[in-house]
Image (spheres, rainbow, N blue to C red):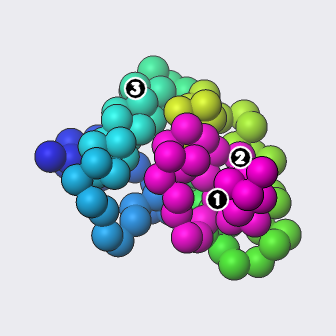
Amino acid sequence: MIDQDAQSRRPKAHAPAVLDAEQALALNRLTAVLAEHLDGGEPIPCNGSDALDWISDQRAAQDRAATACHTCPALDACARYVLDHPEPAGVYGGMTTDDRRAARAA
Ligand code: SF4
């Protein structure tokens, strides 16, 4: 079951519409990591005022978001999540959708 309290603090950019059970567990684990950082006072960039960049279909916005991800304390956990659970859109773990497609093809 997804931790609803932590889920409510999860950036809207990272709320896939349909999850299978395994992905839901993985997302819950990532959400817990994000919540720990937020509770510790460490900002999560995609939870800030530019959050729409993470779900934009514009390349420039995605690039800004991907660059900002590299200051995120949860970067490694987020990148692992999205490489294991491909998301069709949005920026995750410092990677745009094109970056992830290229990483999977390599
Ligand atoms: S790595 Fe990027 S997408 Fe993932 S939680 Fe951090 S800021 Fe958000």
Q: Tag 1: Cα neighbours inside 10 Å, few (<14), some, or many (≥20)?
A: many
SS under mark 2 = loop
**Is residue 87 in sight in this rendering?**
yes
Instruction: Identify the magenta region.
Output: 79-106
Q: Tell me the mark number nearer the camera, choosing from 3 and 1.
A: 1
| Residue type of the residue flagged with mark 2 | Gly
Q: Nearer the viewer, residue 86 or 5?
A: 86
Task: Determine whether 33 is above or below 4 in the image.
Answer: above
Q: Residue 17 carries which label?
A: none
| Residue type of the residue flagged with mark 3 | Glu
Q: Which mark is residue 36?
A: 3
Task: Determine whether 51 is above or below 41 in the image.
Answer: below
| Residue type of the residue flagged with mark 1 | Val
How many numbered circles are shown? 3
Q: Is mark 2 within 8 Å of ligand 1?
A: yes
Q: Does the residue labelled 1 lie within 8 Å of ligand 1?
A: yes
Residue that badge 2 annotates: 94
* Outermost left residue: 1
- Coordinates of residue 66 in the picture (x, y in percent): 75, 52
Q: Mark 1 and mark 2: span between their CA atoms?
A: 7 Å
Task: Determine whether 24 is above or below 74 in the image.
Answer: below
Q: Tell me the mark number nearer the camera, choosing from 2 and 3.
A: 2
Residue that badge 1 annotates: 91
* Outermost top residue: 40
Q: Which of 100 and 96 is in front in this view?
A: 100
Q: Tag 3: Cα neighbours inside 10 Å, few (<14), some, or many (≥20)?
A: some
